[in-house]
Image (cartoon, rainbow, N blue to C red):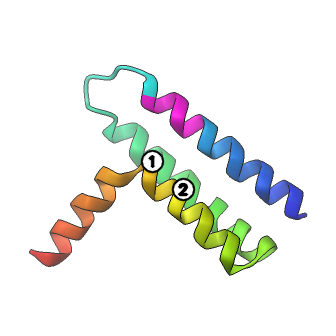
Amino acid sequence: MIVVAASLACLWLIGANLVAMLPTRDHHQTAAYALIAVGIPILGFVTWQAGPFWGLAFFACAASILRWPLIRLWRAIRG
């Protein structure tokens, strides 16, 4: 089962990088929301199957791709 979790995580990361290369009019906002909606269950699955270390590793990789939504969230929290 760890192979399935790792495969899903790698496919998500490849798909996120491919989406980032496409030109869009809304500056990738809708794609970012879709990637977040798909990535959260994958993050939980990876953490459940492979452990917290690999869950954090996947989270770090995903956060490096989706850094602007995280920056906006951090600014909204801070006020």
Q: Which residue is most to the top?
A: 23
Residue located beneath label 2 in the image: 61
Q: Is residue 8 above or below residue 50?
A: above
Q: CA distance from mark 2 to mark 1?
A: 7 Å
Q: Helix, strand or loop at disc 1?
A: helix
Residue 28, image x and y in percent? 34, 35
Q: What is the three-letter code of the residue carrying label 1?
A: Ile
Residues in magenta, as a range:
15-20
Q: Is residue 61 above or below residue 19?
A: below
Residue depicted at 69% across the width and 42% down the height: 11
| Crowdedness near tag 1: few (<14), some (14–19) or many (≥20) residues, C-alpha within 10 Å | some
In the visual, does 43 lie left or right of 32? Answer: right
CB atoms at circles 2 and 1 under 8 Å apart? yes
Q: What is the three-letter code of the residue carrying label 2?
A: Cys
Residue 49 picture quarter: bottom right
Residue located beneath label 1 in the image: 65
Question: For this rendering, which residue is in front, 52 or 24?
Answer: 52
Residue 29, image x and y in percent? 31, 40
- Assess whether residue 53 is covered by the magenta stretch: no
Q: Quadrant of the N terminus?
A: bottom right
Residue depicted at 22% across the width and 59% down the height: 72
Residue depicted at 63% across the width and 45% down the height: 12
Residue 18, image x and y in percent? 54, 29
In the visual, does 53 lie left or right of 73? Answer: right
